[in-house]
Amino acid sequence: MGYNYLFQSAISLLTALFAGAMWALVAMGTPHQGWDNPRFWAILSTTLLPLFLYRQWRLYNRHVRKVLFMLDAIENNDYSIHFPETDEAADTNLVNRSLNRVAHILYNVKSETAQQEKYYELILDCVNTGILVLNDSGAIYQKNNESMRLLGLEVFTHVSQLNRIDPHLAQLLANCRPGEKMQAPFCNERGTVNLSIRVSDITVHKEHLRILALNDINNELDEKEIDSWIRLIRILTHEIMNSVTPITSLSDTLLELTEEENAPEEIKNGLQTISSTGKGLLSFVDSYRKFTRIPTPEPALFYVKGFVERMVKLARHLYPDTRINFRTDVVSDDLILYADENLISQVVINLLKNAIQAIESEKDRKKEGEIGIRAYCNEAEAVLIEISNNGPAIPGDIAEHIFVPFFTTKEGGSGIGLSISRQIMRLSGGSLSLLPAKETTFVLKFN
């Protein structure tokens, strides 16, 4: 409205000045007749000038409305706008072509920006590190697929949504500061996750944002823990066997001498006790050496369905009197696994034996025992075998230690079965974990 008022004022002023100048020239000039009469031209010019200026004003208004209309359309992401370029006057067509060109340039810029954003999103979704971008209020601006997988969420718009998974984790992410490096263990429906979190920041459009890089370091921690146990076991078994072997050897020699010399019965019994105890200790220690002497896997392709069926038959053969039902579910008959079948069979049989013993150990059992074996391929094309049973659940304080060598809750148990199983899976390039569910479920994952 202000521009129109100024334009009209300028037209009025120019008209007045031009009319005044023309009439001044008429007053100063010599009177003439006909077409040479200055008065005639002064009247004609004074009449036509406002009409010309009015036409220019209307043309100006039309062009302004077109520009405003184009800006409104662009602001509303409507790039279908197009002005005719051949149906009007030459100067109007020139303006229309210019406006169409501006709209086309802005459309190309918008398209290139959208393509770049999509490109960067695809790159983020391909990396193995979870990325979260959030503001100081905890609102999530950006996330990739890996971060959603690590957190076990389908929708993630605010940090407060983590409260239903782990309140401590939600508080940690909400209060983290740039430059911090943290570690946050938590449990979700997929198992235990040990998150390594690194925080950096950036300011975009005058808003402070934090960028969180998330990594699951479970495998690294497991490998370090297993390596530490292996070194410890090697040292202990070496020292124990070096100390006990001479004792058993010496006791056997003394037993032979006492038999020749008719030594007292008490001495013979004492030496026999020393010898049998020493041999039993050597046998006991030798069982732990198996943990550090697992043969190198020799992987080959084999069908999972046939493998699972053979494992069930073997478990039934080992426990012929059991009345436990085995439920198998192999998602595809042609599901193939590339691993050392002999070593993996040791892992599966050990888990099936544990499941059978857990079910049969339950007192006052009211429901029928059941063991489930499910094999399938996940979204990342990793093969998973789940072995579950409806026996008594493993308490949380015990579940934290079941993979630790020598840890056992069974009478006479060695405590190395699950440790060896996890070591076999590690050497096979996979993992063995316990799902935190109501039903005891172990998962063998082959990457």
Image (spheres, rainbow, N blue to C red):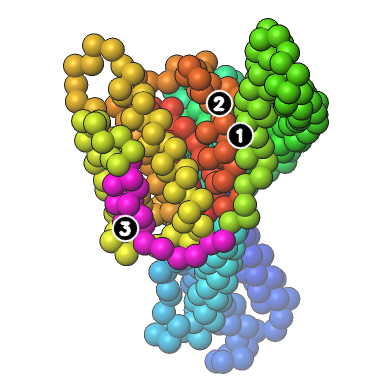
Q: Is residue 295 left or right of residue 303?
A: right
Residue, x 55% and y 46% (percent of image)?
Answer: 425
Name the one closer to the observer, 395 or 243.
243
Q: Which mark is residue 287?
A: 1
Report the predominant secondary structure element of the magenta stretch: helix
x, y percentage for residue 124? Answer: 59, 54
Q: Residue at x 36, y 26 (%)?
A: 357
**Lower position in the chain sequence, tag 2 or tag 3:** 3
**Could you give the CA–CA distance between mark 3 and mark 1, rounded to whole angstroms?**
31 Å
Q: Quadrant of residue 240?
A: top right
Q: Is residue 212 above or below residue 144?
A: above
Tell me the amino acid under the disc marked 1: Ser
Q: Do residues under tags 1 and 2 come within 8 Å of each other at their CB atoms?
A: yes
The magenta region covers 298-315
Q: Residues within 10 Å of mark 2 (few under 14, many from 20)?
A: some
What amino acid type is highlighted by mark number 3? Gly
Membership of 306 in magenta stretch: yes
Residue displayed at 44% across by 49% down? 345
The residue that label 3 is drawn on is 306
Residue 213 vertical position relative to residue 180 in the rendered view, above or below: below
- Real-space Cα separation, disc 1 to disc 2, in angstroms: 8 Å
Find numbered disc 1 in the image and state the secondary structure of the residue it sits on: helix
What residue type is disc 2 on?
Answer: Ser
> Which label belongs to residue 414?
2
The answer to whether residue 398 shows anywhere in this view is yes
Foreground label between 3 and 1: 1
Residue 407 at x, y percent in the picture: 58, 22
